[in-house]
Image (cartoon, rainbow, N blue to C red):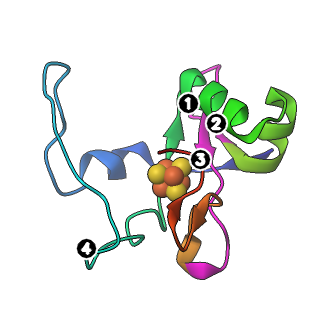
Amino acid sequence: MKYLDIDYNELDQMEGRRLKESDTFHFRCHGRLACYNRCCRNLNLFLYPYDAIRLKKALSITSDSFLDRYVDAVLKEGTYFPHVLLRMREADEGACPFLVPEGCSVYE
Ligand code: SF4
């Protein structure tokens, strides 16, 4: 596991609107869209424990193996528990390791 140093203040300065707990949204993702397979690149993708469990099950690997191979941990100053991020590829514009030409290889 690699430890990264991320400035959380930058997250609050990002464009867009934060979703509230009561918000819902719908989207379609398919190969006829110009942005298809573009959004799964160069991300700070934080994982909750539920995400890690779903991904390790989808990959049929152990939690330890998933954490070793696919996760970076971030220790924020003044906190005791690390945040975990999916480790993006260094090449291929920082693509998600699960992105393939046909789309996401782990989620439907
Ligand atoms: S897990 Fe799938 S949907 Fe999520 S960023 Fe990776 S390729 Fe995209």
In terms of depth relative to the viewer, which is nearer, 19 or 81?
A: 19
- 64 is higher (above) or lower (below) than 1: above
**Which of the two labelled residues, at mark 2 and mark 4, occupies the earlier sequence position?**
4
**Which of the two labelled residues, at mark 3 and mark 4, occupies the earlier sequence position?**
4
Distance from disc 2 to disc 3, alpha carbons, whole Å, reads: 7 Å
Q: Which residues are magenta?
A: 73-92
Whether residue 95 sits left or right of residue 9 in the image: it is right
Q: Is residue 38 magenta?
A: no
What residue did someone put label 4 on? 33
**Residue 96 lies in quadrant:** bottom right
**Which of the two labelled residues, at mark 2 and mark 3, occupies the earlier sequence position?**
2
> Which element carries disc 3, helix, strand or loop?
loop
Tell me the crowding category of disc 2: few under 14, some 14 to 19, or many 20 or more residues within 10 angstroms, Cα based.
Answer: some
At 49% from the left edge and 67% from the top edge, which residue is drawn? 42
- Residue 71, how many percent across, how many down? 70, 44
Distance from disc 1 to disc 3, alpha carbons, whole Å, reads: 11 Å
What residue did someone put label 3 on? 106
Q: Is residue 74 magenta?
A: yes
